[in-house]
Image (spheres, rainbow, N blue to C red):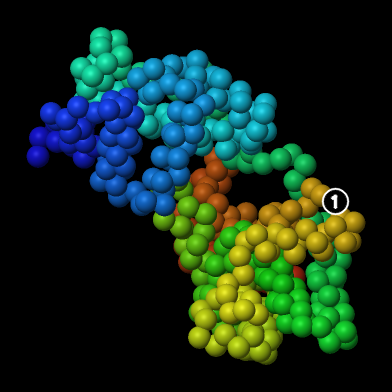
């Protein structure tokens, strides 16, 4: 196959010898079809490609121009619209800009022949150009781009929140309400989010079989290690897996009690999900968010506290307890930054020693290495 026959090439997508009633629309649809083929040939999945195509269509509607009429000025107007009118986060806007950059770079790549096809169809000078440049797109300069108001729980706030979640179980049980099981499930769910530093989506997708033993922490039994199979993915890639070692004994006790004594009462023995609903489904991220907000607001805690704050709290509190920075980084699945990159390649002995040190405050044990902390 020659260079001209690359997946997504114009001559493979355009139907020759056919007069189109709406040639502009036909050309645009052929471009999207070609881009889909080009991305699929690179191994990208439909659930990655489809949102990109929808965004390109939105940009077309915004500009009221076809791709061969787009200019960098259109990108400027679109970015201003997203910022001033839709109030989107910089990371979201940059993601949209990146998608449009990828699409237009595909169109202007001479190997695919779209510029030539446009000039042949619509006349000289009517061809796509690159519309995304360093000076009109947002650069990725910071590892964290979330709202500056977002923060972790203090230890006192975390305790109050978890205590309140437990109280809802007792209230429902005393009132003999149907929601007692769901309240117990949610109380345990929040303990797991905090106790293992999980994201909301990671938590919702946990299965019972994701728990396993950790030889470095036999005291936790079958709950010594959590296999997170749906970690945050890089764009265009599958979810990233990671193993998270259990470090908080009270959280292990809570999840063990839920799995062994409470979950079976939902009557979903054949369902793989850790968090099941009374109707036999899997708890969704939106449901986690709704219950979190209800508890937070009932307690009068700051609106700056969001479900992701439990993950921030996990990192902050382990750091305060003296856990090794690299150990925490591996636990939460963060890639190494410049200050920790030198410690990227560590042995299993290092990780096990760091784990024992993280466990020491909770277990009242001496430093396993025999050194003063």
Q: Position of residue 306 (x, y in %)?
A: 74, 53
Query: Where, quadrant-wise, is the N terminus in this rendering?
Result: top left
Few, some or many C-alpha atoms within 10 Å of disc 1 (few <14, some 14-19, many ≥20)? some
Q: Which of the 4 image quadrants contains residue 91?
A: top right
Q: Residue 137, how many percent across, how many down?
A: 52, 24
Above or below, 325 against 133 in this view is below
Image side of residue 203 versus residue 66, left or right: right
Observer-nearest of 16 and 177: 16
> Which residue is identified by label 1?
302
Q: Where is residue 22 drawn, in percent x and y?
A: 31, 27
Nearest the viewer among 279 and 219 is 279
- Using the image, determine if residue 160 lies above or below residue 8: below
What residue appears at the point 28 percent right and 34 percent down from the top-left corner?
30
x then y, percent, for residue 59: 48, 29
In the rendered view of the protein, which quadrant contains the C terminus?
Answer: bottom right
Q: Residue furthest left?
A: 1
> Judging from the image, what secondary structure is the residue with disc 1 in?
loop
User: Could you tell me if residue 22 is visible in this image?
Assistant: yes
Q: Residue at the location (79% across, 48% down)?
A: 304
Whether residue 357 is visible: no
Give the residue at x 52% y 26%.
62
Q: Residue at x 68, y 71 (%)?
A: 189
């Amino acid at each position: 196959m020659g260079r001209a026959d690359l997946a997504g090439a114009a001559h493979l997508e355009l139907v020759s010898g056919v007069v189109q009633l709406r040639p502009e629309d036909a050309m645009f649809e052929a471009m999207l079809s070609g881009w889909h083929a080009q991305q699929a040939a690179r191994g990208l999945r439909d659930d990655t490609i489809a949102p990109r195509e929808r965004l390109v269509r939105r940009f077309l509607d915004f500009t009221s121009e076809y791709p061969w009429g787009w200019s960098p000025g259109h990108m400027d107007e679109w970015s201003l619209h997203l910022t001033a009118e839709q109030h989107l986060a910089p990371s979201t806007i940059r993601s949209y800009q990146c998608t449009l950059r990828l699409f237009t770079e595909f169109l202007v790549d001479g190997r695919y022949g779209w510029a030539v096809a446009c000039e042949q169809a619509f006349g000289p000078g009517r061809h796509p150009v690159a519309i995304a440049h360093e000076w009109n797109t947002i650069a990725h300069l910071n590892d964290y781009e979330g709202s500056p108001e977002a923060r972790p729980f203090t230890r006192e706030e975390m305790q109050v929140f978890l205590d309140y979640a437990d109280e809802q179980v007792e209230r429902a049980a005393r009132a003999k309400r149907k929601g007692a099981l769901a309240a117990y499930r949610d109380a345990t769910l929040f303990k797991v989010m905090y106790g293992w530093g999980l994201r909301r989506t990671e938590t919702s997708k946990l299965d019972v079989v994701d728990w396993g033993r950790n030889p470095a922490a036999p005291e936790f039994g079958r709950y010594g290690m959590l296999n997170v199979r749906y970690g945050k993915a890089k764009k265009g890639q599958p979810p990233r897996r990671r193993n998270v070692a259990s470090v908080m004994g009270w959280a292990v006790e809570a999840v063990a009690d839920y799995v062994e004594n409470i979950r079976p009462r939902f009557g979903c023995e054949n369902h793989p999900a850790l968090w099941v609903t009374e109707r036999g489904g899997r708890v969704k991220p939106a449901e986690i968010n709704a219950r979190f907000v209800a508890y937070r607001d009932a307690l009068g805690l700051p609106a700056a506290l969001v479900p992701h704050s439990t993950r921030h709290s996990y990192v902050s509190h382990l750091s305060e307890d003296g856990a090794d920075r690299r150990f925490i980084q591996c636990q939460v699945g963060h890639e190494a930054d410049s200050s920790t990159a030198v410690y990227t390649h560590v042995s299993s002995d290092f990780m096990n020693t760091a784990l024992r040190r993280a466990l020491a405050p909770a277990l009242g044990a001496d430093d396993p290495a025999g050194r003063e902390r």
